[in-house]
Amino acid sequence: MALVTSALGLTLLLKNIVSTAGYLFFYTAVVASAWFGGKWSGGFAVVLSTLAVAYFFTPPIYSFRITRESLPLFIEFAASSVVISWFSSYRKQTETALAGARDELQMRVEERTAELKRTNEQLLAEMAERKRAEDAYYEAQAELARVTRMSTMGALAASISHEVNQPLAAVVTNADACLMWLSSDPPNLEEVRSAVDSIAQEGTRASEVVRHIRAMFTKAAPERVRVQLNEVIREVGALMSVQASRNEVALQIELAEDLPAAIGDRVQLQQVIVNLVLNGIEAASGVMDRPRRVAVKSERTGSDEVLVAVRDSGTGIDPKDQKRIFDAFFTTKSQGMGMGLSISHSIIEAHGGRLWASANDDHGATLQFTLPIDHESAA
Ligand code: ADP
């Protein structure tokens, strides 16, 4: 209504100044009403404009009557008003619908993006959780292996040191007494003789203890069954694979086909191979400038022996330690017990075989042992 009234005012005003103004303002009012108010508002503007035009501008002026001459002009105005009103409201409707669809689309895209973000965050959290659990599992496993080794060896070491300490303490006490009797004036040689006697006795006792402990490893008669060493090596490979990959060491297994069986104690032989592979992995873990590798190989040598070699690309054995690595308690590792090679050596000897170490041509060391074959299975 306000728009049509303004259009009327403007048209009346401008009619006297510019004759070409025509009905432009009425059209504008109709378009604006239909645009902002919708089709009902547009229709109302059409009716009002038509009435205003009929009353003010179509002869006879100031009357709603329409003469025959002005009828075509009046109809043209009314019809074009209706058309532009409809068109304007239609355009407005389409645009509103389009804007609505766009808003909805945007909302859905935002919702979906947020959902994807949430899923992604959940996935990342799950992955981090799984990684943590995996790390904890590996750590627990490594710790378990270390504790098992340490506790067995620790208990053994404690009992050995307890057994050996007593005679050694007696030796020291008697030696002190000996010095005292020798320095008295005149020296009491009788007492000195008896102290030296005691020293000899205690020394013999200590060496008996050591011999006895060694006998525990060597004399315990191993079980004597047929052992397929290839199977044992495969089992050890599976057992050590986690340890190897944790240390980024490639564990390779090269088995000779138709390897004859050996005779012996399966568990003890497995223990030997575990020790050698573990040492290889530990040695290889120390290198940074070349691939870390441990290869376990089996082969038949000569007519009556099988050979198992564990070759690593590690730090190698210091030549000055070469002779001592099979000694009990010899270790160069901060956490080492120095028992692995000593026990392995005893086991292989008890099986009638031989265990030795050698330096590789390039890098690292090879520890290998031979065992007599079971002639029945070889035949
Ligand atoms: P531990 O592993 O507890 O030290 P071992 O008796 O198994 O005890 O080994 C004794 C020592 O021999 C090690 O500390 C190490 O110095 C040396 N050794 C054994 N295997 C290897 C190897 N593959 N490469 C280099 N050194 C080795």
Image (cartoon, rainbow, N blue to C red):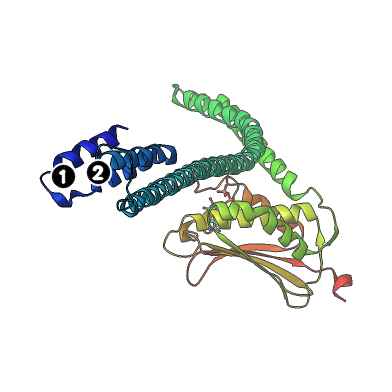
Residue at screen point 63% across, 30% down: 162
- The residue at the far top in this view is 185
- Foreground tag (2 vs 1): 2
Q: Secondary structure at mark 2?
A: helix
Residue 17 in sight in this render? yes
Which residue is the site of mark 1? Answer: 15
Callout 2 crowding tier (Cα within 10 Å): few <14, some 14–19, many ≥20: many
In the image, residue 349 lies at what x, y percent? 72, 58
Residue at screen point 24% across, 48% down: 24
Residue at screen point 66% across, 39% down: 148
Callout 1 crowding tier (Cα within 10 Å): few <14, some 14–19, many ≥20: some
Residue 325 in sight in this render? no
Q: Is residue 188 above or below residue 118?
A: above
Do the residues bearing badges 2 and 1 touch, measured as CB atoms within 8 Å? yes
Q: Quadrant of the N terminus?
A: top left
Inter-mark Cα distance, 2 to 1:
10 Å
Q: Quadrant of the C terminus?
A: bottom right
Report whether 55 appears left or right of 214: left
Is the distance from the Cβ of mark 1 to the nearest ligand 1 atom less than 8 Å? no
Residue in the foreground of this view, choosing between 264 and 252: 252
Report whether 281 appears left or right of 160: left
Residue 41, numbered label: none
Which residue is the site of mark 2? Answer: 57
Residue in the foreground of this view, choosing between 67 and 38: 67
Tell me which corner region of the image, top left, top right, bottom left or bottom right, holds residue 157: top right
* Lower sequence index among marks 2 and 1: 1
